[in-house]
């Protein structure tokens, strides 16, 4: 349920209403807009007399929300959410470029890639230290050592770090990581999502391989319901009947998610296609359809990459993509 207050309501009257609603056992999500204030009521709203609330002098309207996701619902929070990572802003008209290797392999590799993508205009450095792999025989990442190499790359370039966390038991290792990524395989790892909700840290939440948009938003709801509102949604392709690309990039998800939620939405064309030559056109398409950013895999030697070399751009190729994306942004 949402309660929309009239413009110019006195703070004392608003606080009295909020206190009364909290005494009914509800959690209140307050959204301050330029022209109105929206109170999002989360909990058992069946005990709330809608007619009584709507009759109050300070209330403009009362509406029930049918969708199961409340905290991340656009109706609860009409204004776009802007997630801040240091000086970098994502959402609300701010566009973010995230780039780096799929896996951190060595100090030389990750620092070289970090310097290259920064020179091309990247805002954040991505790199996998913990890697969920389908085969137990594939490279699983350098784990804690990989995180340390990412910190070295951050110190060398100033780029904030985005890297994946696979288990809540590893949270201590990620204490100074700038953005924690929840990968597609962990999108419905609810124990992990609950723990991430207790942090004051941005979370990049990727859509699962075969999950609906509602399921993605419900996963975001788990994080927000536990107190952390700093969430970046990521469309990274879903499994369909395609037999020529790794996944199917669902670009319609971008405007749809923007309609349903106030959270920023970025796109991962690397995992979506699995083919490096397709990353460039899909990055441009994602930008054109209104994405708030891109996360792209870049490797200085893709042929010899230990993970996902086939979908990784070279630094030179990334320069071209970044330039074209900027031109599209200027047009938009």
Image (cartoon, helix red, strand yellow):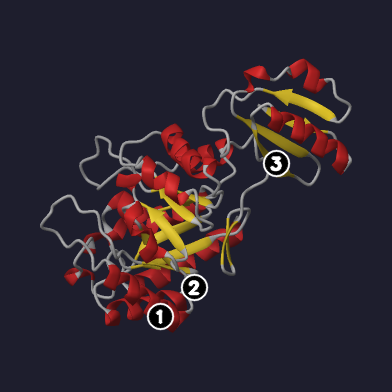
198 and 98: which is toward the camera: 198
Q: CA distance from mark 3 to mark 2?
A: 36 Å
Q: Is residue 243 left or right of residue 201?
A: left
Q: CA distance from mark 1 to mark 2?
A: 10 Å
Q: Is residue 187 left or right of residue 259?
A: left
| Mark 1 or 2: the one toward you | 1
Identify which residue is drawn at 25% across, 47% down: 245
Q: Which residue is mark 1?
A: 115
- What is the quadrant of residue 16 in the picture? top right
Residue 144 position (above or below residue 49): below
101 and 54: which is toward the camera: 54
Q: Is residue 242 left or right of residue 226?
A: left
Q: CA distance from mark 3 to mark 1?
A: 41 Å
Q: Which residue is mark 3?
A: 30
Classify mark 1: residues with Cα within 10 Å, few (<14), some (14-19) or many (20+). many
Under circle 1, the secondary element is: helix
| Mark 3 or 1: the one toward you | 3
Provide residue 302's location: percent of width, then percent of height: 23, 69
Q: Which residue is mark 2?
A: 121
Q: Is residue 31 visible?
A: yes
Please report whichever mark, 1 or 2, sits nearer to the chain's N-terminal start: 1
Asked if disc 3 and disc 1 are in contact, CB closer than 8 Å, the reply is no
Report the disc number at residue 244. none
Q: Is residue 237 left or right of residue 222?
A: left
Q: Is residue 321 visible?
A: no
Under circle 3, the secondary element is: strand
Identify which residue is drawn at 38% across, 59% down: 171
Identify which residue is drawn at 85% across, 43% down: 11
């Amino acid at each position: 349920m949402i309660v929309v207050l009239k413009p110019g309501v006195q703070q004392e009257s608003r606080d009295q209403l909020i206190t009364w609603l909290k005494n009914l056992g509800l959690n209140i999500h307050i959204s301050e807009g330029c022209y109105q204030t929206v109170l999002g009521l989360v909990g058992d709203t069946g005990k709330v007399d809608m007619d009584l609330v709507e009759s109050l002098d300070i209330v403009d309207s009362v509406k029930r929300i049918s969708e199961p996701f409340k905290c991340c619902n656009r109706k609860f929070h009409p204004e776009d959410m802007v997630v801040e990572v240091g000086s970098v802003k994502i959402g609300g008209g701010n566009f973010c470029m995230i780039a780096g290797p799929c896996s951190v392999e060595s100090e030389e590799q990750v620092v070289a890639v970090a310097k290259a993508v920064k020179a091309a205009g990247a805002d954040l450095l991505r790199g996998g230290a913990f890697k969920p792999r389908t085969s137990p025989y594939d490279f699983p990442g350098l784990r804690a050592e990989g995180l340390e190499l990412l910190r070295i790359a951050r110190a060398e370039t100033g780029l904030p770090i985005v890297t994946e966390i696979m288990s809540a038991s590893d949270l201590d290792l990620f204490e100074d990581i700038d953005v924690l990524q929840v990968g597609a395989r962990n999108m419905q790892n609810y124990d992990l999502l609950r723990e991430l909700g207790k942090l004051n840290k941005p979370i990049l939440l990727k859509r699962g391989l075969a999950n609906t948009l509602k399921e993605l938003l419900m996963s975001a709801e788990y994080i927000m319901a536990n107190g952390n509102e700093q969430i970046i949604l990521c469309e990274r392709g879903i499994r369909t009947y395609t037999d020529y690309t790794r996944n199917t990039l669902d670009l319609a998800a971008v405007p749809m998610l923007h309609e349903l939620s106030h959270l920023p939405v970025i796109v991962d064309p690397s995992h979506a296609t699995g083919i490096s030559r397709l990353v460039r056109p899909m990055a441009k398409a994602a930008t054109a359809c209104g994405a708030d950013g891109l996360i792209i895999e870049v490797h200085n030697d893709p042929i010899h990459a230990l993970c996902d070399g086939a979908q990784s751009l070279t630094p030179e190729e990334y320069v071209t993509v970044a330039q074209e994306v900027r031109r599209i942004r200027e047009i938009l």
